[in-house]
Image (cartoon, rainbow, N blue to C red):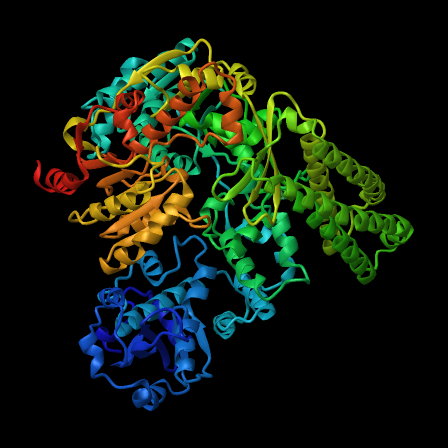
Amino acid sequence: MSETNQLLQNLSTKDKRNITKILPNSWVTLDIESTGLSPKTDKIIEIGAVTFTGNELVDQFSSYINPHRKIDPFISRLTGIKQTNLDNAPDFSAIKQSFMDFIGTNTVIGHNIHFDLSFLNQNGLILSNPSIDTLKLAETILPNCMGYSLSKIAEYFELTNDNPHRSISDCILTTQVFLSLMTKLLGLDPIILTEIKRLSEHGSWDSKFLIDKILNLYPDAETSKTLLTNLSAVESINPKIKPPLHKNLLPALTRDSITSILSKNGVLSESFPEFEFRKQQIEMAFEITDSIKSQKNIIIEAGTGIGKSLAYLIPAFLSAKSNNKPIIISTNTINLQEQLIQKDIPQLVKALSTSNIPAISYTALKGKSNYICTQKFFNELNSDDLRPEDTYILSKIFIWLTQTQNGERSNINLRKKFDLEWWKKLSAESSDCLQNHNNCFLKISREIALLSDIVIVNHALLISDLNNKGNSIPNYNFLIIDEAQNLENEATRQLGFNVRLNDLSILLEFLISDLAKLHNETNKHNHENFSSIIAKNNLIFNKIKELVSKIIPQSNLLNQQLIEMLKIPDYKTSETTYILRISEETRVTSTWEKLHSEWLNIYNYLSQLHEYLRTFELSIQKFSDLPTPLQQIVNQLSDRCNNLEEIEHSITNFIGNSEDNYVYWLEAHVNLNEINFKRAPLKITEHINDLLLQNNTTILTGATLSTNENFNHIKTQLGLNDFKEVFLGSPFNYKKNALIIVPNDMPEPKEDNYQEILAKMISDATKINNAKIMGLFTSYSSLLKTAHTLQSFAKENDINLLVQKPLTSPYDLVQQFVQSTKPLLLGTSSFWEGIDLNDDLNILIFARLPFQPPNDPLFQARSELYDNPFKEYGLPQAIIKFRQGFGRLIRKQNSKGIAIILDKRILTRSYGKEFIKSIPKTSFSNQPISNIHNRMDDWLNNST
Ligand code: SF4
């Protein structure tokens, strides 16, 4: 074999030998470039293919194709293919035969090959060769790859592409990806391969024959199916984690030991060349040291760039030596939780450890829905009801189970709606599980937490643990709450509810279908006692069906009445949602009384239904030896009954038994296809006090806790008493590195031409050389209007317009932003905080000041608690949000950025200066619109 033709240079001898055995004949990889994504309306502009055998490139074919139309400049920039390359190129029909000859009868490979094949079909070339899609293969066998585009998979395998989006270059990369995937498949245990083969036979996998070929390499492999009915097969491959316990190696917690670690010449500066000494960081660590030692509560605002994580982690580590209970650290986002677990803590452990002995044990603990229930997974794996489309995801999860250390959702790439629905079905969430499987990841995670020195949780788990009287988080003496500004929102979310009326009918329909399945399965399995119980319960089943047939139409009627209420124009609406606050006045109207009596009818039927279901449940509880499919349905029925009770309880509370300390409202999308009953607590202070008082010491921190240089707002909202208050400003030089610009002739947001000028200002900003821009909106409709206006401008100017949409993941948008040379990201709520664009952001645009919509029911109800609602509640809330948004701008010592505030009220209203006062002192420019572009360009590109 010639060395220059080798596709993968660093293949092991064993893999090379096996790949050659599996691919002894020629294979072809093909790729087309086109004018767009639709085979019906778009045209091929380039076609390429390579043949290879084993690891060797044999031959290649490529040709431009004349599309007989002008190609979009975007496509031209993306591919590097110019109009002049195509104008004299052959038609597809002219190269069709030679291309077919090149492919011959070989197996064809492609990345998302069905896209390429559908373009060929459209041009009259129907290939019946066996095919393999590297996209499908990668999605299944690389469960933790960050993404499945060709470039993401190439990144995963550390492969490079010199000429992306050109046919031959993409063909070679796809072949390399395919061979790398082969090495992954060859590395799988034959037991796993056998199971994947079994699943592939249920599905319509084009790569089925490949798995057969690999399995043929292991003629004597143990492939007994009994190994795969529980986790023992996985367990033998995936050893459990044992937390290390060497904390005696750490110094005691004193200010001196903190200095020895965080000072200019301390341990961290020796361990990490990039470590920067920050005075505020060491001060924060001192404050936390004092708080832990004196067991006094403290609230610390730590400005951006202090490095607050290290400032609390180090005292937490050092106190572990004398503390026999874990310290709990709670973050708002799973992102920060991951950053602590994956980056900050391991770095610190390494720096503080001697002789490779870890000095501390730590773990992350998440809510139940973040862990897979292996029992449910194996039940599904062995179910007879698998649909072809289920087989890929089950294979993926199966492979992942053999690799994951903790069974957590964050370690598997599940982004599609279909995959997420499967996760929901398999997660440990709905298992109010009294079972005690040894291999349960949820159980293992809680056991490890008990033995750990530091346990990282998130606010959601912290609050739910409080609500459930503490059965998930180990006992603790010290609690550090980071991102404490979000505690109120999380408590509000968890102490309230959001129930859809439609869910009631859906659940009842599922219930009937479960009962039918139960009958079918009982007939299939020869379990005499169970069969006789089912037969005896026939009368009950009929009663249940009868009740369901009465409840569903009544519930539809109720739904209709609610829709009529929501449609009345006087009621409050937002842009995309109808909202109706249910006040005490609403509850005494005749409309509500009628509704109440309708619900009482439904409620009576539901009560009877529960009685029957409970009687039936009691009669089958005694069986502990049911075959798996039967047991599965019994468990499912029990889950359905619990869900039904929850929904019934919530709607009853909403319609009939409202409580004083709660706000109630109805909400529906403007298409009115589903009504939501929503409830939220008016105040959360009592609940938070329970959380904070049950433990000795609480440390609250965050970058945006204060307003107007005091903590009064957060103290009132959370009901904090007896907390030492500390402010530590950012170490960054904002005066030098940040400029705020306010156009003083900008119309006010309520004026007619505001939206038009907003879009114009954003498009002007994109004309600044090399500027990476993010626009923050407070209203989704304004965001969409702006995106719509800018769409063709962005395309013509090669701007990567990234728009937040309901189902787009903020993480994906951030990744695309960072990787683009000219991105313009438009985002709403989740982009105002918690995302980190590093120093990739140059211009941050505030579409308007972030006041809450006054008709938001919760905001409205909470405002009513104050004498001066705007000053005491609305303004502080908006200032905190503004500070959070502004915090996105400068993330590193030498980052430089401009914030443009397109809301003139910051200049013209008396409260405007409070916004400016709330952020670090920056350069400030108040200019007419016509000057803004030059001012920005000058400051960003010319000033030093
Ligand atoms: S113990 Fe419960 S949650 Fe854990 S694997 Fe078993 S059934 Fe699932």
How far across and how far down the image is residue 519, in percent? 81, 57
Give the residue at x 27% y 14%.
256
Give the residue at x 29% y 79%.
67
- Left/right placement of residue 14 relative to residue 78 reads right
Relative to 258, residue 366 above or below: below
How far across and how far down the image is residue 759, in percent? 29, 46
Decide which of 404, 810 is in the foreground and name it.
810
Relative to 348, residue 784 above or below: below
* Residue 833 lies in quadrant: top left
Residue 652 visible? The answer is no
How far across and how far down the image is residue 809, in percent? 42, 48
How far across and how far down the image is residue 708, in percent? 32, 17
Give the residue at x 47% y 32%.
458
Residue 544 visible? The answer is yes
Decide which of 893, 234 is in the foreground and name it.
893
- Left/right placement of residue 203 relative to residue 269 reads right
Question: Where ligand 1 lies, by quadrant?
Answer: top right
Decide which of 663, 639 is in the foreground and name it.
663
Relative to 103, residue 688 above or below: above
* Residue 153 lies in quadrant: bottom left
- Left/right placement of residue 243 relative to residue 517 reads left
The N terminus sits in image quarter: bottom left
The C terminus sits in image quarter: top left
| Numbered-mark total | 0
Relative to 137, residue 770 above or below: above
